[in-house]
Image (spheres, rainbow, N blue to C red):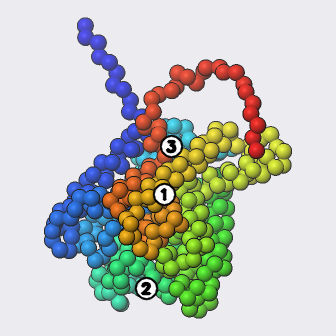
Amino acid sequence: MPVFKKAKRESPARTLVLGFLIIIAVGTLLLCLPAASKAGKFTSIFDCLFTATSAACVTGLVVVDTWAYWSIFGQIVIALLIQVGGLGFVTLITFFNVAMGKKLGFRTLKSASEDLTESSFQNGRKIFIRIVKYSLIFEATGALIMSFALFPKYGGYGIWMAVFMSITAFCNAGFDLAGMEGEFSSLISFQDNPAVLITIAMLIILGGLGFIVWENFLTFRESKKLSLHTRTVLVMTGALILAGTLFFLFAEWNNPKTLGNMSFGEKVLNAFFSSVTTRTAGFDSISMGDMSEFSQLGTILLMFVGAAPGSTGGGVKVTTLMVVIVTVVSYIRNKNDVELFRHKLNKLVIYRTVVTLALSMTAVGICFSALYFSMPSDAGAGSGAVQCLFDAVSAFSTTGLSAGATAQAGFLGKCVLIVTMFLGRVGPVSVIMSLVMNTQNRKNIVVPEGDILIG
């Protein structure tokens, strides 16, 4: 009698990585077609790979201006890549986290005994429908509002601009179609248009909060409480937006190339927008290359933090920063346990925080070094150390802002940026887990306890 072996179950992390590779490959092939470019000719596969990776990983770094180079067909392909990369990522990462027992990357939901996650993620079909439903509602609302601002100036194309930028804003991608006002100018021509900037900022924030926060608000009438995760995300998001706004106002107040020549209201508007968009969105209403290096360093920190777990944004996540803060506070106060909003955090949360930070900083360090040392000898402005670090963090955090290093980078540098964008979107922990062998049989091994001096 023949014996049939049970098929080996593919790890969720490996499925996630392969899924994104397939999305990028399909996007690359579609963008290579002559119909995708305005010139009606084949585009080099490397430029298509860079663009497809940036779109699928919802980053926003580009080698050609989206409006000036790509046809309507090409722009639609990019929009679909962003939509699939944004919503597909949320859906896949939800299943991945549940399969790994991480509860959207923040296991304090379990330690806090919040049953919201347990009840919300039992039905995979329900998850997908809710994500798509509310995402489309947010995007349609944003597109409608921006249409009123763009249609009078750009006619029918203004409606497509509104739809395109609504998708890219909600998915925290940073692609835009404002190239007719100047290639690679992003939203600088709209810096005095609150309807566009505020709408895009709100879409960025909504996309960056994550599905678990939306779910908590949707079920608040029944549960009558906000989960620990939701409170953490809301507090950190609000604090970072306020801190970033004040930072940009202070650092760029008198800079004539950025905020210096604006009215008070425009300064506040653009400082607020910069604070929101620097945490993984990638639009800019003031040129990042014209900012002082002090401001660029501050922007690097905001980009590195990023958005919330399970969202369309990247970075190491706001919850990771909160865990670091409360761990330091708990240690200073000589507490045996790490507490957050009167809840004790599971030690695995602390371990994962350390691993996430270590792998993220390693990835950024490698990308920065490769980018800096691969710069062509004749590279001009934007090729300095701060600018290379800026673009390396931007690629890893899937922000898409650039201080000029991407435009100056050679072939090797852009290859490194492609890998970094992919790594940042999928997550360094996920990539490592997809490559390593199963170590489950080592969990019960007992080893002697040791001690070393720290600090």
| Residue 57 on image: x %, y % | 40, 57
Q: Earlier in the sequence, mark 3 or mark 2?
A: 2
Q: CA distance from mark 1 to mark 3?
A: 19 Å
Q: Which residue is mark 1?
A: 368
Q: Quadrant of residue 279?
A: bottom right
Label 2 neighbourhood size at 10 Å, few (<14), some (14-19), many (20+)? some
Disc 2: which residue: 189
Name the residue nearer the viewer: 1 or 387: 387
Report the Cα–Cα distance between label 2 and label 1.
Answer: 30 Å
- Residue type, label 3: Val
Mark closest to the chain's N terminus, 2 or 1: 2
Mark nearest the camera among 2 and 1 is 1
Front residue of 84/293: it is: 293
Seen at 75% across and 50% down, the residue is 328
Residue at the spot x=63%, y=84% of the render? 253
Mark 1 and 3 residues: CB-CB less than 8 Å, in contact? no
- What residue is pinned by disc 3? 429
- Name the quadrant containing residue 169: bottom left
* Side (left or right) of 211 relative to 379: right
* Nearer to me, 329 or 72: 329
At a point 35% along the width and 56% down the height, the residue shown is 412
Q: Secondary structure at mark 2?
A: helix
- Furthest toward the front, the residue is 377
Nearer to us: label 1 or label 3: 1
> Of helix, strand and loop, which one carries label 3?
helix
Q: Is residue 296 visible?
A: yes
